[in-house]
């Protein structure tokens, strides 16, 4: 028959043993120490000067004095002496001075509230991790905050997303019901992109910041610029729509060279401008005017201008610049007029342009 128990090393009463009460009381003493284990502290390396009878401690590393060579053991002060108990893996204790629970892992005592998490392959918060996403969380709110300087931190909060090569992707993916609707990051290059999608498959870049130059590009910005490639005749005192039929650029096809109209693709504020060059017909005394008209009826305030000075054919110009709030579907056209005598709006030097600014 064994002399002690396998877990707590409690002494067994042997057959025909004398003074059985001594062995029994020793077993009770061990149980009294290690069950419902609560220790006064676990961060001391030197025994306290005046310990209370029955007080227990977990001996910290590199202990000295009466605790030397008893690191991680449970020390009990009883009958003016120290007794030591060697823990086994799985023992738990409540540390009174830190209000913390600790567990012995076979080598050291570690806090149960903040165990060291290393080499975890998957982690699901409120859900089972999804394929390809080792970390998954099903929550309604999340917060990352800096560790303040007063708490021992720097006050900074930095989140880093890293990729291996230029052709790889890193960034944020925004979804609706697990269908991608937006991207923000560096995808397929080192340029910073902001893109959106209506179907999760085809993406439109709203903003690109070139990684080499820092220059911002807005590929989907509604904008156009065009000129007329023939002299537009202007009858006397008659507003004439200028034919803009040679387009330098026309993003989103917002200008129709067939109708000579710009159509706002979305609601917003637009910057619009025009340059008209006078070319005489029978007289240089003709006065030239211009205006921008919305939906064929309403003149944009601030867009009307007229030149009444003496004209020099092919050199006298009239410049318009204005902003207008347009609704999606509104059309804008450039109109010109000649006063007193007929004339022309010169080819290749009569332009119309615009773009969305807000």
Image (cartoon, rainbow, N blue to C red):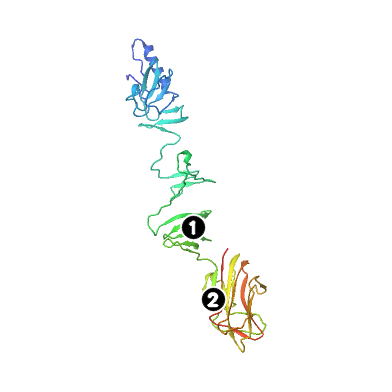
Decide: marks 2, 1 in contact (CB < 8 A)?
A: no
User: Residue 243: horizontal and vertical position, in percent?
Assistant: 58, 80
User: Residue 13: horizontal and vertical position, in percent?
Assistant: 36, 15
Foreground disc of the pair 2, 1:
2
- The structure residue drawn at horizontal position 41% and vertical position 31%, both measured from the top left corner, is 103
Residue annotated with mark 1: 183
- The structure residue drawn at horizontal position 48% and vertical position 54%, both measured from the top left corner, is 172
Residue 106 numbered mark, or none: none
Assign the C terminus to one quadrant of the image.
Answer: bottom right
Say which of 349 and 62 sits in front.
349
Q: Does residue 261 sit above or below 169 in this rendering?
A: below
- The structure residue drawn at horizontal position 42% and vertical position 22%, both measured from the top left corner, is 56
262 to the left or right of 55: right
Q: How many marks?
A: 2
Residue annotated with mark 2: 226
User: Residue 231: horizontal and vertical position, in percent?
Assistant: 57, 84
Under circle 2, the secondary element is strand
């Amino acid at each position: 028959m064994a002399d002690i128990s396998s877990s707590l090393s409690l002494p067994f009463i042997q057959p025909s043993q004398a003074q059985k009460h001594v062995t029994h009381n020793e077993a009770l003493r061990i149980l009294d120490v290690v069950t419902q284990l609560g220790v006064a502290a676990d961060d001391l390396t030197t025994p306290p000067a005046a310990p209370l009878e029955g007080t227990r401690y977990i001996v910290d590393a590199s202990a000295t004095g009466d605790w030397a060579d008893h690191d991680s053991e449970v020390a009990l002060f009883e009958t003016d002496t120290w007794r030591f108990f060697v823990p086994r893996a799985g023992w738990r204790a409540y540390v009174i001075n830190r209000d913390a629970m600790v567990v012995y892992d076979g080598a050291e005592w570690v806090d149960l509230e903040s165990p060291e998490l290393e080499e975890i392959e998957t982690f699901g918060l409120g859900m089972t991790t999804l394929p390809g996403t080792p970390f998954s969380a099903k929550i309604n709110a999340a917060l990352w905050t800096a560790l303040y300087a007063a708490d021992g931190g720097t006050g900074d909060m930095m989140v880093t997303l890293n990729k291996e090569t230029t052709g790889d992707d890193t960034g944020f993916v925004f979804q609706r019901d697990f269908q991608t609707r937006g991207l923000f990051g560096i995808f397929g290059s080192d340029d910073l992109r902001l893109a959106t999608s209506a179907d999760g498959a085809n993406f439109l870049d709203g903003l690109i910041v070139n990684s080499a130059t820092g220059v911002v590009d807005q590929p989907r910005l509604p904008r156009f610029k065009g000129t007329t490639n023939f002299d537009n005749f202007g009858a006397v005192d008659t507003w004439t729509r200028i034919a803009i039929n040679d387009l330098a650029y026309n993003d989103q096809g917002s200008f129709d060279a067939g109708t000579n109209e710009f159509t706002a693709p979305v609601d917003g504020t637009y910057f619009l401008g025009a340059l008209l060059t006078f070319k005489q017909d029978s007289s240089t005394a003709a006065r030239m005017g211009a205006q921008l008209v919305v939906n064929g009826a309403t003149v944009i305030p601030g867009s009307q201008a007229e030149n009444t000075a003496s004209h020099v054919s092919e050199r006298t110009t009239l410049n318009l610049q204005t902003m207008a709030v347009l609704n999606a579907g509104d059309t804008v056209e450039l109109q010109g007029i000649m006063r007193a005598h007929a004339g022309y709006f010169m080819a290749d030097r009569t332009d119309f342009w615009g773009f969305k600014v807000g």
